[in-house]
Image (tube, helix red, strand yellow):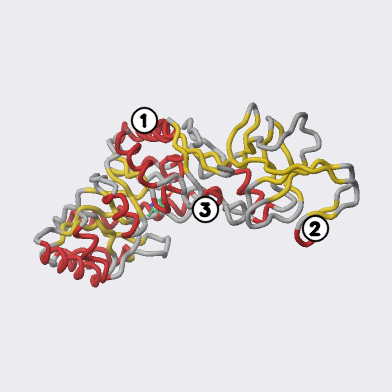
Amino acid sequence: MLTWVEIDLNAISHNINQIKAKVKAYNAGIMAIIKDNAYSHGAVNVAQTATNTGVNMLGVATVEEAVELRQAGIDHPILIICGILPGQAETVVKHDIAQTVCTLDTCKALSKAAEKCGKKARVHVKIDTGMNRIGVNYQNALDFIKSALAFPALTMEGIMSHYAVAETDRDFTELQLSRFKQTLSQLEDSGIRIPVKHTANSAAILRFPESYFNMVRPGLITYGLYPSKDHYGLDLKPALSFKTKIFYLKELPPGQDISYGRRYTTYKKTLVASIAAGYGHGYSRSLFNKGEVIIRGKRAAVIGTICMDQCLCDVTHIPGVSIGDEVVLIGKQDDQEITADEVAEKMDTISYEVLCRINPKISRIYVK
Ligand SMILES: *Cc1c(COP(=O)(O)O)cnc(C)c1O
C-alpha cells in the first residue's frame, strides 16, 4: 500500500478523558461528535473507542451515518444533529435514533412513524440563538415546543443550541447563551421539563463552562486538535497521521520545468522524489509551492503542480533517500511534525477541512 491514514485510538481515548476531566465538576455528560466519518478518522472505530471510554451519546450528521453505526452493532444513544426530510422519519425511528427537530412537519412525520412502529420518537429541539443556520428562533421556542409536545408519539428528550463564534467572540457567545437561558426559564415557568440540555462545541468547552448545561458536544478536540491557538489547559494528542511513500527518484539538472503547467523550474541540480499523494487522495492542489512533507526526519518541499495521484518533492538535501521511504504528509517522524493546522494555514482554511478532504477510500490503519 502506497498511501494510508493511521489512526491512534489511544489518542482518542486520551482526548475524551481530558474532556471528561474538564467537564466533570459541572456534571455534564459527553456527546462525541463523529459526523463526516468521525472527521475522517472512521466512524465505527471511533464510535467503539468513544463508547468504551464512557461517552454518553454519539452525534452524527445524517441518517446514513447513524444507520452505519447501528449496522456495525453500536447500540449506544445516537443523535442526528442536522435536519432530515419527513420521508426519512421512519428509518430514524426504526433504528432508535434521536433526531434534532426544528419544524413541525418533521415532528409530525416522526410521531406518525413512531405510532406505526409502536415506539416513541426521541427528539432534541434545536433553538437558534444567533447562528442562523437551523433551529427555531429563541423568541418562538416556547410556542414551538408546546406544539411539538402535542404529537402523541414524540418524547422531547433534549434541547440544544449552537454557537457561531465561540472561538473568537466572547460577547456574542454570551448573548447566544443568555438567549438559550431565556428559553429554558420560559419552559420552567410553563412547567415543561426537557431532560438533556446542550450547546457546547469544542471552542465553548475550552472557553465557556457556563455553556455545558448537562451535556457537551466535542468534535475537533476529540481528535486532538484545538479550535484556536490557546489550549486552555487541555493536553490533547492528534489521532490522525496521513502517510505515503516515495515510488520514483530522479536527478534533474538546473533549468528543468516540472509537472503540469511547468510552474516550477529547478535552479540547481535537484533530486526529485515522486510520492503517491495528490488531490485525489485529498492532498489539496492549493498546496503547490507551499506544501512540505517529512522524509527521513527532514522536511522536504513539494515542488510543481500537485497531480491527481502524485506530486513531486525536492529531496536533494536528504542523505540516503530511497524508493520506498515513508513520507509524512500529516503527523510526526523523528523530531519533525506537520500538523493539520499547519496544512490548513497553507491552504487558507481550517484543520476541519484538511481532515475531511482525505479521501474516505484510503485505508485507515488503527493502532492502539
Ligand atoms: C460539528 C458540530 C459540533 C462539534 O463542533 P467542534 O467545533 O468540532 O467541536 C457540535 N455541535 C454541532 C451542532 C455541530 O454541527
Q: CA distance from mark 2 to mark 1?
A: 50 Å
Three-letter residue code for mark 2: Arg
**Residue positioned 57% across, 40% down in the render:** 229
Three-letter residue code for mark 3: Asn
Given this view, does label 3 or label 1 mark the residue nearer the observer? 3
Q: Are marks 3 and 1 in contact (CB under 8 Å)?
A: no
Tell me residue 214's x, y (percent).
Answer: 27, 43
Tell me residue 192's x, y (percent).
Answer: 16, 56
Q: How many marks?
A: 3
Q: Are marks 3 and 2 in contact (CB under 8 Å)?
A: no
Tell me residue 55's x, y (percent).
Answer: 30, 38
Q: Earlier in the sequence, mark 2 or mark 1?
A: 1
Three-letter residue code for mark 1: Ala
Q: Quadrant of residue 156?
A: bottom left
Numbered tag placed on residue 21 in the rendering: 1
- Residue labelled with disc 3: 359
**Number of residues whose C-alpha sits closer than 10 Å to that of mark 1, classed few (under 14), some (14–19) or many (20 or more):** few
**Residue positioned 63% across, 40% down in the render:** 245
Q: Is residue 348 left or right of residue 302?
A: left
Q: CA distance from mark 3 to mark 1?
A: 33 Å
Of helix, strand and loop, which one carries label 1? helix
Q: Earlier in the sequence, mark 3 or mark 1?
A: 1
44, 345: nearer the viewer: 44
163, 356: nearer the viewer: 356
